[in-house]
Amino acid sequence: MPTYTPPLRDMQFVMHEMLNVVEELKMLPAHADIDADTINAVLEEGGKFCAEVIAPLNLSGDAEGCKLDKTTHEVTPPKGFKEAYKQYVEGGWPALSCDPAYGGQGLPVLVNQGMYEMMNSANQAWTMYPGLSHGAYEALHAHGTPEQKATYLTKLTSGEWTGTMCLTEPHCGTDLGLLRTKAEPQADGTYKITGAKIFISAGEHDLAENIVHLVLARLPDAPAGSKGISLFIVPKFLVNADGTLGARNGIFCAGLEHKMGIHANSTCQMVLENAIGTMVGEPNKGLAAMFVMMNAARLGVGNQSLGLTEVAYQNAVTYAKDRIQMRSLSGVKAPDKAADPIIVHPDVRKMLLTARAYAEGGRALSTYVALQLDKALSSDDEDERKECEAEVALLTPIIKAFLTDNGWIATSHCMQVYGGHGFIHEWGMEQFVRDARINMIYEGTNTIQSLDLLGRKVLGNNGATLKKFGKKIATFVEEEGTSEAMQEFINPLADLGDKVTKLTTEIGMKAFQNPDEVGAAAVDYLRVVGHLCFAYFFARAAKIALEKQGSGDPFYTAKLHTARFYFAKLLPETASLIRTARAGLQPLMAMDEALF
Amino acid sequence: MPTYTPPLRDMQFVMHEMLNVVEELKMLPAHADIDADTINAVLEEGGKFCAEVIAPLNLSGDAEGCKLDKTTHEVTPPKGFKEAYKQYVEGGWPALSCDPAYGGQGLPVLVNQGMYEMMNSANQAWTMYPGLSHGAYEALHAHGTPEQKATYLTKLTSGEWTGTMCLTEPHCGTDLGLLRTKAEPQADGTYKITGAKIFISAGEHDLAENIVHLVLARLPDAPAGSKGISLFIVPKFLVNADGTLGARNGIFCAGLEHKMGIHANSTCQMVLENAIGTMVGEPNKGLAAMFVMMNAARLGVGNQSLGLTEVAYQNAVTYAKDRIQMRSLSGVKAPDKAADPIIVHPDVRKMLLTARAYAEGGRALSTYVALQLDKALSSDDEDERKECEAEVALLTPIIKAFLTDNGWIATSHCMQVYGGHGFIHEWGMEQFVRDARINMIYEGTNTIQSLDLLGRKVLGNNGATLKKFGKKIATFVEEEGTSEAMQEFINPLADLGDKVTKLTTEIGMKAFQNPDEVGAAAVDYLRVVGHLCFAYFFARAAKIALEKQGSGDPFYTAKLHTARFYFAKLLPETASLIRTARAGLQPLMAMDEALF
């Protein structure tokens, strides 16, 4: 069975040495009192919960899966999940970065982000039960009426209730404009909602006493398409005026999906039959309200793959040090053994270092974005809020798609390190791969992310936000340009920055002729920009590591080697990506549909 | 549930239009009477068996898996498997390319290869029951005594019995030199064999009345390491002198593995307790005899992923034409529908075309290698036999690793086309991905393949075999160099050929200093050479397609577009691979083991 050790040292490095988060957070009124010790202590304690309580349930949960009682429509998650959730609630973990006005602890988003990375490493399927609540919390916090907030936010904050996002229907996922679920207004101001939803993660379970479904549906007079969608709260149990639970609402789990991975999470087909709901936000503007959840969820999905990359790496390293097989091509390395440990083989190291670099790069980028999110939420300077918001919007699709594609590559590499044993369930490695696969799909496929990045976030404002982010990189390049030791990092970083600028302009020009050029280049483009981000953060990490080389702390040596590996063996992927992005639309569209 | 249509037209194109296999085969005494109609008819008939009999069992077989009765040690494969196998045997399919001296039909290997591609598309897990027999057949055919041949070959040819390869033990897979299973010589010339084997595909089942295990074990006085391993036949039931079945032998299935994929194949832990066996070939030379099986098996594994790539492509195309979602960025394409079919989106096409190009490239390369194998087996010119053998040896690791890595990429892309539905078992796409994953591991991991290619097959003879193959490419480049229409294919092909030559020399020089440089570059190198092969065959295909453009047959238009796509969007991967290969060993080995 896999083991897990929270990567606290690297988290601290990223937060305190690279991003100086405490200084930045202290500028925000809501976090004026924050200090490094608090952050570290919370993450250390949270790490224990992850490693000791939920990690041991990951393999068994996958094997057992969820059970649906077709008569009562009740879903039972795997053994131990309910007890672990109870501990999670008792520990106050759901409240970490929630608003103190509703019982939250008011810690920065970035602390919650660190906690979730560890939860995802330990048990992605379990983490999705509380994980969806946070999105519901944020949508209600931003768009709910005072009554709705009073009724639901405290319970979501405490974790007594969990939340879901009910968007997808059998015929529509990406294209929510097609959705058909109906909401009929009632005399009392509520709505009766009827329809069928699919792929509802944590849609039904017995971990919490109530489930707060956020449901997209159409009013009778709604315009067609995405401008006719409204958002509703549909609780599993209706809530009485005094906050106690009332009657069972007409929203039921009609079936559980049989999936490639995340077996232990209940992915539900939900049927709504005159389910009573109240509207969130304005009529026909539900999609905008839902996007508050979506954006949080997209960062969350990137974080899932970051977690999987880290835990897969840790276990593959242990195996590679332990497993002996063949001798090193350059001579015997372990003469006392019948063969050398496989970590002596260069390609085994390459697979391990790929996962390591993707974990460290992902952690740096995610933490950076979480910090910008904290500023966007809590700064008292409106300009800063807007600027940070824009940067988060720019980087969100990169975190979602780049980190999940990397997670797929990394978990597959780590599984490969195990040879045949990697394919066997008991070792746990193949589960990481299967679990990682959904992250490239849900909350907007990675193709959709790439269109969001290139079409909306970059070309949509003529590259203004990208330029601002690029300026940060250029400033760093400028500052370190005279450092001899930094040349190996600065030169390729600066070079890639130039190439991104050129590529962006080139695609922009082409898209002017034919908007489909965006679709042809977007996926490659997103990976190129993802690498630009990673190269930037690895260069910043290398700078610190070089400065601290004399400290005797091997952490810095490892960081430097990992950065060098990244520049030598992973960044060069951009050479191909730029070529294929530039190859454009024609090779994709030339063939008539009938010839496929 | 996925559907499957045998790709007969493309098979015929590769065989008859591109490789002129009939002319080449007719030169071989064993195949003097072959004609295209026979080949086509066999494959058409075989395709029906695959599409109608075994394809419908693929999804259900995966869901059901195999059952082991721990008391009787008997394994029951999923419903329908036994009946399908009966039909397979009755159809004479096991005998296709077997020696007529033992009841075989004596058809060329390349016909069998085509049949197996289709079987793998239809049901990889089922196909592994008869699939392993062929390796056992070949090892015995090459190394068996006349008695052993008489006893076993007819039964393997008819399919009444199946075969296995019992190599791996819990502590050794790649490094067979470590194996511990013991063989004690008996007075009657047999051996009593005791030990534990794992990962034995089709190790126990009820499809055939007997199972012929080929087992690696050590004699009591054997030298340590790989030079002390002998090969034995250990039948499940002992065989009486008259060919009837005798007592149950001491070889039992002690457990079934729970795996990521190929659930319907029984992957057995086999225990041998004084199992009676006879030796195949000479004492302590078992590994060499086993390699006959291994090489066949490696080609077979590449073929598994070719099959999966094709079937995943076919289904993803159907889905992409059927599923409507969003409008094309360049304007509405299906005004009569609520949204456009997703095949209008450039990235969906990119995913589909990637799978299509990998299937077509893989089919061309595999068929080419099968033809060389036929020549290696049946030419009456010893020089030709040796030359073809060397070429097959060169290309075998490329087929194994390049086709299986491509299969992983392609099946994952095809699954992605389905969005969330791709993750759901009922659609069948995620099964293709899970099944494809093992192909990168077994019969020598893809890292081992790359070391075999670069270390042994290329640098091992100073590039002589690679040069000979390169000469074929150079001749083609020369011949087509003056054709204006062919420039788009010839120029990048010639360029890549030059780069491979330079890269090979460079790595060879480095390896002279440090043999680990081979291990650092090998995986990237193999993919570069794989692309060189695909570029060569796509250029040849494009030449024919250009010539036949006037025929009005849309097949040639599609072939040309696919070739152009390949050159524009897939071949550029080599730009990165060459860079990372050249980045060498240092970034991999610099970090101390303790710092991982």
Image (cartoon, coloured by chain):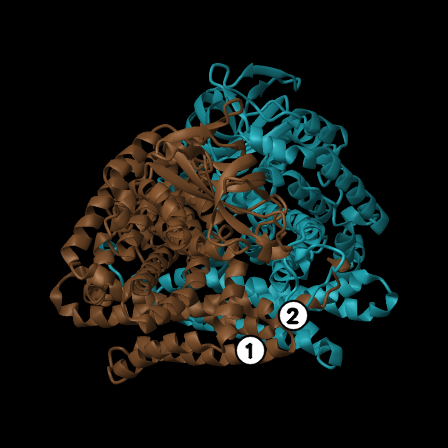
Chain colours: A brown, B cyan
Q: Report whether residue A344 is seen.
A: yes
Determine the secondary structure under disc 2: helix
Residue under numbered circle 1: A508
Residue A397, percent from left and from top: 45, 62
Residue at point 20%, 71% (across, down)? A546
Q: Is residue B30 left or right of residue B431?
A: right
Q: Is residue B67 left or right of residue A159?
A: right
Q: Residue A199's mark?
A: none
Q: Residue B473's mark?
A: 2
Q: Is residue B471 left or right of residue B574?
A: right
CA distance for labels 2 and 1: 39 Å
* Residue that protrudes farthest toward the right in the picture: B551
Quadrant housing the C terminus of chain B: bottom left
Q: Chain of mark 2?
A: B
Residue at point 82%, 69% (across, down)? B549
User: Measured along the vertical axis of the image, is residue A194 above or below residue A145?
Assistant: above
Residue A570 or residue A90, whichever sits in front: A90
